[in-house]
Amino acid sequence: MKSNKFIFEEFGLKKYDSKELIMGVINHQINHCKLEYLSQWERSHSTTSTSKNQKIEVLEAKKRALEVFFDACNSDHSPINFNVSIELKEMNTNTEHS
């Protein structure tokens, strides 16, 4: 298995910029989850929304926790540092044939 890893670090962002960036990523995940569900539902109307709703609730809980975090920051000028790690793992696609 081959792996590629990228680390993005940003230091000293303003509170508003950090919050907007992180909330945007979570909102994108929520929208992607909804679109994925709609696509599955169009293929098969028997698809249930239970899994989608659970994923969205987890993401909404993360958003609420981040709201608390950002609200606890002392001022809009407090610098915020964050680190994002992105890893792409390529699976071995070679299979044995009988």
Image (spheres, rainbow, N blue to C red):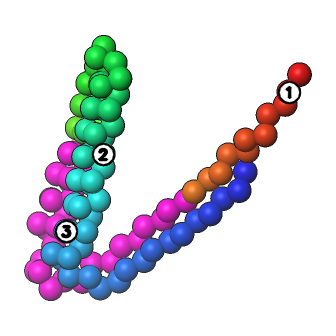
Q: Residue 86 placed where, x, y %?
A: 50, 62
- C-beta proximity under 8 Å, tags 2 and 1: no
In the picture, the disc for residue 51 is none
Rendered-image quadrant of the C terminus: top right
Q: Residue 43 placed where, x, y %?
A: 35, 23
In the picture, the disc for residue 97 is 1
In the image, residue 57 above or below residue 75: above
Quarter of the image for residue 40 reads: top left
Q: Amino acid at mark 2?
A: His
Give the mark nearer the N terminus: 2 vs 3: 3
Mark 1 residue element: loop
Q: Residue 76 placed where, x, y %?
A: 11, 80
Residue bearing mark 3: 20
Q: Nearer the viewer, mark 1 or mark 3?
A: 1
In the image, residue 60 above or below residue 44: below
Give the mark nearer the N terminus: 1 vs 3: 3
Q: Nearer the viewer, mark 2 or mark 3?
A: 2
Mark 3 residue element: helix
**Is residue 89 found left or right of 31 in the rendered image?**
right
Residue bearing mark 2: 32
Q: Rounded to the nearest whole Å, what is the CA distance between mark 2 and mark 1?
A: 37 Å
Mark 2 residue element: helix
- C-beta proximity under 8 Å, tags 1 and 3: no
Give the mark nearer the N terminus: 2 vs 1: 2
Q: Rounded to the nearest whole Å, what is the CA distance between mark 1 and mark 3?
A: 50 Å
**Is residue 9 found left or right of 97 in the rendered image?**
left
Q: Which residues are magenta?
A: 58-87
Residue displayed at 28% across by 17% down: 45
**Is residue 64 found left or right of 4 in the rendered image?**
left
Residue 51 visible somewhere in the drawing: no
